[in-house]
Image (spheres, coloured by chain):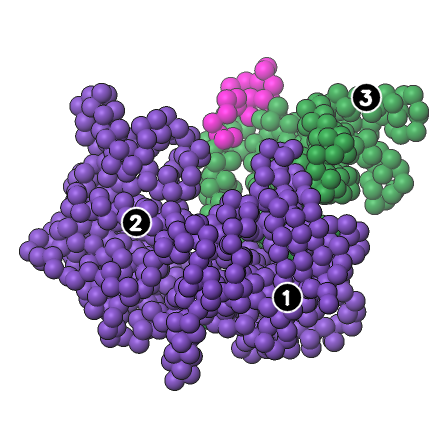
């Protein structure tokens, strides 16, 4: 299991390297001169050149890349052109809200999807199953910004029980923090709930058709136990993959939901950085998100090993 | 007295009665008896067996009465059913690797049945599980109890499945093709174990099989099923010596028998060699951080023009790997493999294509070796098109129709899809596809092992006729000694990637030089109860040596 972990983690290094190069050159390839944007349209050419020098924009690309990546390895992602703070600090400030929203969203999605998907598989073809199919179809196709607006109208405008928009830190003010996050989590989570419900249903159905379930049934194991002990664990691999992917995409920022509900998350940081050609922030955020993404993938791989002994114990086959 | 199992007028149909899979089947399993239900695929034998535990596929309409130790199974409530399953009757499945849940230890899975039937104490359960594993002959059960299924061999897995069935000492054990997925030498051990279950525990056993050798080895009484009906019921000795039903007679005639004098002398001239393997080594690249294990080690043989060489071996012997190396699918890593005098290790690109053109390949499973979205016509025409062998569309068409005729299929098959064909028809199409380019050499990898015996007999007959008429050489790979004996001039025996013995079919089958060959020949159960009983005694003495 240890070598498995090491192997999986080692495989991430080249990916990170490639991503860092791509990210760095993206900023360079994008049109627009940061120095010009910082100084505004009225600036003198000489001032612009001076600023370009001090920003290091006149160095060769390779030199700048090596400089940037060696700093990044030490945790220093440079300083934002606009925010007057180190990029790492900016990421730190904006990542908190995103994580809180992502966790709440995924919890909501799981609470809905795992039981519904499992039961839909159990009663395949029934009215319940068809109802679930309808729900997932709507959940997948309904635009989340429309859903957000409907939720705001119902809960904030008519019922007046939840705030329209804004953000409070969950740790310093748990009650209000939660109240602010409920609507964004509901509007974001519905798509994921629908997606995961479908995955759960399909994989549980697959497992229920396998012979070892029949074999356990022939031993007198009850239907409920078959469903929850045998089927759910074996169906775990595709489900966990789906959850991992969903969570990773939530962490990389729900731009639309963050702007509708005015949450200062990583998504809004990224969008602002792009608009302002704030290269250090742009590069830092993308690199950081790649790391998060890969980290979650690694976690999913390790969970595979825990669920499935064949992954964990390869090479110890008895003769 | 109450019978352990009595089935009366069982009818199972699908699609609102459109398909009648089981028609009016009645049978009785007596205490301490081994009853075999024999039939080919589609005879309804598995459905009948599964109905004993009320395990029907979706959409089945069932009528009749099944009484299991005096209880009506079809009328039982879900709770009663859970109690009957495992306690009154238990099942042994065909494929042990799919009958065990891969993510739980075998101990957990055996214990689960015990727990479901009221054994609550953990330690008591574990002791009982270890005891069961020891009973079914798993070495070192104290350690193995915590193993996962993939850590055991196929034979051991089947022993675990049997241990599960025995867990609650059920009155009836239903074994659905329990040895079909296993090698012959392993099969003998499993059959012995089942016999012990009856002798020592007094279980009654209902065994479902298509293998008449297994029937002769094990069964007291036999029920023969054909198209959902019972066509004959007799004691095992009577059935084999004087079969009454027409179908039974045909079935018995179709079984290839070892040592019936069909083995051919080797009298082909060795002037022109089609294939030469010289100290052939095939090693697949190992996974990261693992030393690769050679699949084939130092194997030397040759095949002369017009000669059929049979390669026999059990799973993992490397026989398929060698066959695939001929067409370049598995890598030759050492020694030499010369096809038509050209070493396969040193040809690439166009030369290799030209060589491949002269070789046909017949795959094991006709169900999966066709693209199911291509018509039979396109399947057969594909090699002709790939090699641009024919100048015009009409020429292509007439060649494909000619091929269909050669494999004795009607012309109108050309427009059908593989999924619409039966297994036997599909394998004929496979043969036609292999013959399309008029190859001088054909590699056939277990071409009949997915087929029923009566169909296998016809396909083998066709193969032999075509081989005589067209004169191609062949490498015929099989695990079935009787099939190889029937079809080949010379036979090679493989084990663990090494060629143990090579000689004319007659030589190898009648006077095997190697002990393993002898064990292999003796492990094949013969469809004759009296002969089989003698043979079994021989194998026992051989194994105890």
Picture colour for chain A? green
Q: Position of residue A3 (x, y in %)?
A: 52, 62
Residue at the far top: name it. A42
Q: Residue at x 13, y 55 (%)?
A: B304
Locate residue A261 relative to residue B173 in the image: left or right.
right
Residue segment shown in magenta? A26-48
Chain depicted in purple? B
Q: Residues within 10 Å of mark 2 (few under 14, many from 20)?
A: some
The label nearer to you, 3 versus 1, is: 1
CB within 8 Å, label 3 to label 2: no
Query: Which callout, 1 or 2, points to the residue nearer the camera?
Result: 1
Q: Is residue B385 above or below residue B92?
A: above
Mark 3 → mark 2, Cα distance in angstroms: 71 Å
Q: Which mark is residue B30?
A: 1
Q: Quadrant of residue A142?
A: top right
Quarter holding residue B134: bottom right
Q: What secondary structure prevails in the magenta region?
A: helix
Q: Which residue is mark 2?
A: B460
Q: Position of residue B418 (x, y in %)?
A: 41, 34
Please give the name of the residue rendered at 70% of the width and 53% of the height, measured from the top-left corner.
Answer: B66
Q: Residue at x 66, y 54 (%)?
A: B7
Which part of the image, by quadrant, shows the C terminus of chain B? bottom left
Between B155 and B1, the one lying in front of the other is: B1
Residue at (90, 40) in percent of width and height:
A175
Q: Mark 3 sits on what residue?
A: A150
Question: Measured along the vertical axis of the image, is residue B452 above or below residue B500?
Answer: above
Q: Quadrant of residue B483?
A: bottom left
Q: Element at badge 3?
A: helix
Query: What is the chain letter for disc 1?
Result: B
Residue A244 seen in render: no
Question: Which element is circle 1 on?
Answer: loop
């Amino acid at each position: 299991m240890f070598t498995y972990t090491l192997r999986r983690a080692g495989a991430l290094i080249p990916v990170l390297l490639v991503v860092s190069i791509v990210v760095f050159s993206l900023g360079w390839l994008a049109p627009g001169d940061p120095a010009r944007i910082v100084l505004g349209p009225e600036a003198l050419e000489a001032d612009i050149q001076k600023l370009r020098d001090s920003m290091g924009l006149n160095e060769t690309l390779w030199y700048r890349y090596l400089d940037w990546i060696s700093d990044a390895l030490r945790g220093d992602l440079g300083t934002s052109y606009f925010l007057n703070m180190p990029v790492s600090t900016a990421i730190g400030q904006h990542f908190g809200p995103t994580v809180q929203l992502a966790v709440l969203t995924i919890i909501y999605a799981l609470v809905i999807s795992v039981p519904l998907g499992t039961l839909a598989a159990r009663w395949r073809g029934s009215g319940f199953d068809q109802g679930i199919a309808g729900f997932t179809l709507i959940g997948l196709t309904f635009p989340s910004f429309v859903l957000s607006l409907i939720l705001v109208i119902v809960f904030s405008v008519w019922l007046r029980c939840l705030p329209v928009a804004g953000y409070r830190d969950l740790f310093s003010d748990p009650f209000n923090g939660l109240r602010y996050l409920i609507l964004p989590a509901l509007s974001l989570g519905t798509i994921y709930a629908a997606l995961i419900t479908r995955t759960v249903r399909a994989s549980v159905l697959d497992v229920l058709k396998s012979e070892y379930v029949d074999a356990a049934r022939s031993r007198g194991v009850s239907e409920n136990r078959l469903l929850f002990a045998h089927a759910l664990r074996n169906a775990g691999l595709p489900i966990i993959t789906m959850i991992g992917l969903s969570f990773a995409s939530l962490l990389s920022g729900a731009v639309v939901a963050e702007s509708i509900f005015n949450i200062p998350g990583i998504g809004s940081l990224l969008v602002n950085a792009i608009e302002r050609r704030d290269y250090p922030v742009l590069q830092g955020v993308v690199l950081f998100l790649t790391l998060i993404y890969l980290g979650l993938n690694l976690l999913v791989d390790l969970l595979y090993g825990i669920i499935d002994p064949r992954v964990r114990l390869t090479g110890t086959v008895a003769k | 007295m109450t019978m352990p199992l009595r089935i009366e007028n069982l009818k199972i149909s699908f699609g609102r009665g459109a398909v009648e899979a089981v028609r009016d089947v009645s049978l009785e399993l007596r205490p301490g008896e081994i009853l075999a239900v024999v039939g080919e695929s589609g005879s309804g034998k598995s459905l009948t067996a599964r109905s004993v535990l009320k395990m029907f596929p979706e959409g089945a309409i069932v009528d009749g009465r099944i009484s299991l130790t005096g209880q009506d199974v079809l009328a039982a409530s879900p709770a009663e059913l859970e109690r009957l399953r495992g306690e009154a009757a238990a099942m042994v499945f065909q494929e042990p690797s799919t009958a065990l849940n891969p993510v739980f230890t075998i101990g957990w899975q055996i214990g689960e049945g015990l727990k479901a039937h009221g054994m609550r104490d953990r330690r008591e359960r574990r002791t009982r599980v270890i005891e069961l594993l020891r009973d079914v002959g798993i070495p070192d059960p104290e350690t193995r109890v915590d193993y996962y299924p993939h850590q055991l061999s196929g034979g051991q897995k089947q022993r675990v499945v049997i241990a599960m069935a025995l867990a609650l000492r059920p009155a009836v054990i239903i074994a659905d093709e329990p040895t079909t997925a296993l090698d012959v030498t392993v099969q003998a051990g499993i059959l012995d174990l089942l016999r012990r279950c009856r002798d020592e525990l007094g279980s009654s056993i209902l065994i479902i099989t298509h293998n008449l050798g297994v029937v002769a080895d094990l069964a007291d009484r036999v029920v023969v099923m054909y198209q959902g009906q019972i066509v004959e019921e007799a004691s095992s000795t009577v059935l084999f010596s004087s079969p009454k039903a027409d179908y039974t007679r045909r079935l018995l005639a179709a079984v290839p028998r070892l040592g019936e004098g069909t083995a051919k002398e080797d009298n082909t001239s060795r002037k022109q060699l089609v294939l030469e393997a010289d100290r052939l080594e095939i090693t697949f690249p190992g996974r990261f951080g693992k030393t690769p294990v050679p699949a084939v080690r130092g194997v030397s043989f040759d095949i002369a023009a017009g000669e059929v060489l049979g390669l026999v071996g059990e799973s993992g012997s490397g026989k398929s790997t060698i066959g695939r190396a001929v067409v370049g699918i598995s890598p030759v890593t050492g020694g030499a493999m010369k096809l038509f005098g050209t070493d396969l290790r040193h040809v690439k690109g166009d030369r290799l294509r030209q060589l491949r053109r002269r070789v046909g390949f017949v795959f094991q499973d006709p169900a999966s070796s066709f693209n199911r979205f291509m018509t039979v016509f396109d399947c057969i025409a594909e090699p002709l098109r790939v090699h641009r062998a024919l100048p015009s569309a009409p020429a292509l068409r007439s060649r494909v129709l000619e091929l269909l005729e050669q494999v004795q299929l009607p012309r109108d098959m050309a427009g059908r899809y593989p999924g619409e064909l039966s297994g036997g028809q599909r394998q004929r199409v496979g043969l036609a596809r292999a013959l399309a380019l008029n190859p001088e050499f054909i590699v056939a990898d277990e071409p009949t092992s997915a087929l029923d015996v009566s169909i296998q007999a016809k396909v083998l007959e066709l193969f032999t006729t075509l081989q005589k008429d067209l004169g191609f050489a062949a490498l015929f790979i099989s695990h079935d000694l009787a099939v190889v004996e029937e079809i080949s001039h010379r036979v090679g025996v493989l084990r663990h990637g090494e060629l143990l013995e090579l000689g004319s079919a007659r030589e190898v089958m009648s006077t095997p030089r190697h002990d393993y060959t002898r064990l292999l020949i003796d492990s094949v159960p013969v469809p004759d109860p009296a002969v089989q009983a003698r043979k079994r005694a021989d194998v026992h003495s051989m194994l105890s040596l």
